[in-house]
Image (spheres, helix red, strand yellow):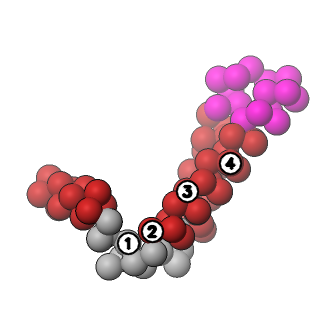
Amino acid sequence: MLDMALNSITLFFQGRLFKNIGSVIRMAIIGIIITAAIIVAMHFAGLPLWVSAIIGGAIGGAAQPFLFKDLKYA
């Protein structure tokens, strides 16, 4: 298991893990923006920051499978 993780890390930093790294980066940025927007909106709505972070993180994490559904590995 550790060997597989190290191999994936090596391929990622060599730029050979994904077929289209631009698409991966774009989807990751979209997920970060969605999560940050939810956290900020909930905090301005009056929730404590720690509650906003938990809810925003859960929603952002739930969005990841949808964002990365078409991800292709090299």
Quote the CA–CA distance across marks 2 and 4. Answer: 18 Å
Which label belongs to residue 21? Answer: 2
Magenta residues, as a range? 39-53
Question: Quick one: label 2 or label 4, which is nearer the N terminus?
Answer: 2
Q: Badge 4 is on which residue?
A: 33
Q: What residue type is labelled 4?
A: Ile
Which label belongs to residue 18? Answer: 1
Question: Quick one: label 4 or label 1, which is nearer the N terminus?
Answer: 1
Q: What residue type is labelled 1?
A: Phe
- Occupied quadrant, residue 3: bottom left
Quote the CA–CA distance across marks 3 and 4. Answer: 9 Å
* Residue at 26%, 62% in the rendered image: 14
Give SS at disc 1: loop
Residue in front for this viewpoint, 47 or 28: 28
Asked if residue 62 can be seen in this view, the reply is no
How many callouts does the rendering have?
4
Query: Few, some or many C-alpha atoms within 10 Å of disc 2 (few <14, some 14-19, many ≥20)?
Result: some
Q: Badge 3 is on which residue?
A: 28
* Residue at 51%, 68% in the rendered image: 22
Does 8 sit left or right of 61 as displayed?
left
Residue in front for this viewpoint, 23 or 34: 23
Q: What residue type is labelled 2?
A: Ile
Give SS at disc 2: helix
